[in-house]
Amino acid sequence: MAEDLRSLYVTALKNTHALELQALQIMERQVERLERYPEMDAALRRHITETHGQRDRLEEALSALGESPSALKEGVLGLMGNLAAIAHTPAQDKILKNAFANRAFENYEAAAYDSLITIAEAAGQAGPITGFQQSLKEELAMAQTVADLVKPTTQRYLQLTLSGDKADR
Ligand SMILES: [Fe+2]
């Protein structure tokens, strides 16, 4: 593989790996405190398990090239860093902001896999592509799941808030 193509591929692998680590952080923070939103909680827990597999696929592809993942650098991911910060917001409507962020994040991840697969193909790295296509499928499915959860989450938020209950978790 040409050296510049190899380094573009390795960079894409490392960036996608960092993205998955950030995905895990964001989801793990949310499930710690999701008491009144069991569907969101279940969807996130299921996707945390899937994300472990996605992370492992990336690590395997890196180690097959004699490379290892970069340490996660907070803030390096721009938009995603800002979305990650939402999980810490103490506001009552945090649950809504997290629902928006989850929908954005999963679509961002799907785009990252579309791009990674394209680069892997260009680099002639056929081996890991099947696994990345599986990851892409999982991201697209989760993107749909969290998109579908925006309305019921908002309805539950309204119901809790209007009855004077805590609605933020
Ligand atoms: Fe994901």
Image (cartoon, grey):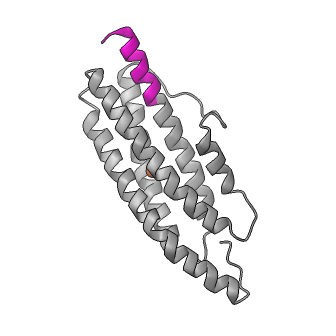
Image quadrant holding the N terminus, namely top left
Q: Residue at x 27, y 27 (%)?
A: 121
Where residue 159 appears, as percent x and y from the top left, is 62, 86
Vertical order, 122 against 51 (above or below): above
- Say which of 134 and 94 sits in front: 94
**Is 154 inside the magenta-drawn segment?**
no
Q: Is residue 1 left or right of residue 111?
A: left
- Say which of 4 and 38 sits in front: 4
Give the extent of the magenta segment. Answer: 1-13
Vertical order, 122 against 56 (above or below): above
Q: Residue at x 54, y 42 (%)?
A: 21
Where residue 96 appears, as percent x and y from the top left, is 61, 67
Where residue 126 appears, as percent x and y from the top left, is 23, 28
Where residue 129 appears, as percent x and y from the top left, is 27, 34
Q: Residue at x 35, y 46 (%)?
A: 135
Count of numbered badges drawn on the protein: 0
**Is 9 inside the magenta-drawn segment?**
yes
